[in-house]
Image: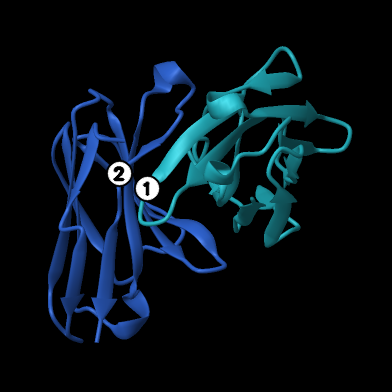
Chain colours: A blue, B cyan
Amino acid sequence: DADVTQTPRNRITKTGKRIMLECSQTKGHDRMYWYRQDPGLGLRLIYYSFDVKDINKGEISDGYSVSRQAQAKFSLSLESAIPNQTALYFCATSDVGQSDTQYFGPGTRLTVL
Amino acid sequence: AQSVAQPEDQVNVAEGNPLTVKCTYSVSGNPYLFWYVQYPNRGLQFLLKYITGDNLVKGSYGFEAEFNKSQTSFHLKKPSALVSDSALYFCAVRALYSGAGSYQLTFGKGTKLSVIP
């Protein structure tokens, strides 16, 4: 969905490095999410935010942190990357007025060597 | 805890034939149910959702899904498959209630659909 953008689209980094993945949306949604996708495991929720002052841990938050800089921006950080964080990362947004239907960005493919 | 099962890792169907991608769910209370499609190197695209009302839901690209409460299923269907339908399909569920945790969307592991020319 072009209304949700993610940068970078691909990133290769080394173990121990700090990495930030960024997400921006023009949908005007209050709610934003970060997921990771691993082959055969589907999508798992890392963090979510219902508004700028609200941050919540998801199913697999260990090793990750987030920042909600504005309604439209939600960043995911890996403080010290490790190889098992190699995955496809997706940002999503939703609006409670639309039954919280989530709309996804194109994803960031992260490889940790 | 809520869960989604997609019992088939892969579904193969000939072009022009009807297709079905299966999904069963478990959730407390009434569910919100969703189908998403992921094309190679792309994000997930919303296809359709069931909230309430008619058990047959129509969505994008000619897809539809049938909600069956007694069987806790929400199978995705299309009358005539196209080669361009080949992709990874995800079913997702969340509980229809407000309160802590009501946001959480639980995804199945995905079903790879291959439409053979």
**Residue matched to label 1:** B43
Name the outermost residue toward the right: B70
Query: Looking at the picture, which amino acid does disc 2 mark?
Result: Gly
**Which chain letter matches label 2?**
A
Q: Could you tell me how far apart the alpha carbons at marks 1 and 2 are, in whole angstroms?
A: 6 Å
Q: Secondary structure at mark 2?
A: loop
Query: Looking at the picture, which amino acid does disc 1 mark?
Result: Gly
Q: Who is closer to the viewer here, B79 or A35? A: B79
- The x and y percentages for residue A44 are 47, 58
What residue is drawn where x is 44% and y is 19%?
A98
- The x and y percentages for residue B93 are 61, 39
Same-chain check, marks 1 and 2: no
Q: Find residue A105 and name its label.
A: 2
What residue is drawn where x is 27% and y is 28%?
A30
Looking at the image, residue B6 sits to the left or right of residue B105; the answer is right
**Which chain letter matches label 1?**
B
- The x and y percentages for residue A46 are 37, 57
- Asked if residue B67 can be seen in this view, the reply is yes
Q: Is B9 above or below relative to B56? A: below
What residue is drawn where x is 45% and y is 49%?
B39
Q: Are marks 1 and 2 in contact (CB under 8 Å)?
A: yes
Indicate the quadrant where residue B45 lies.
Answer: top left
Name the outermost residue toward the top: B53
- Asked if residue A78 can be seen in this view, the reply is no
Instruction: Classify 10 Å Cα crowding around label 1: few (below 14), some (14-19), many (20 and above).
Output: many
What residue is drawn where x is 73% and y is 50%?
B13
Looking at the image, residue A86 sits to the left or right of residue B47; the answer is left
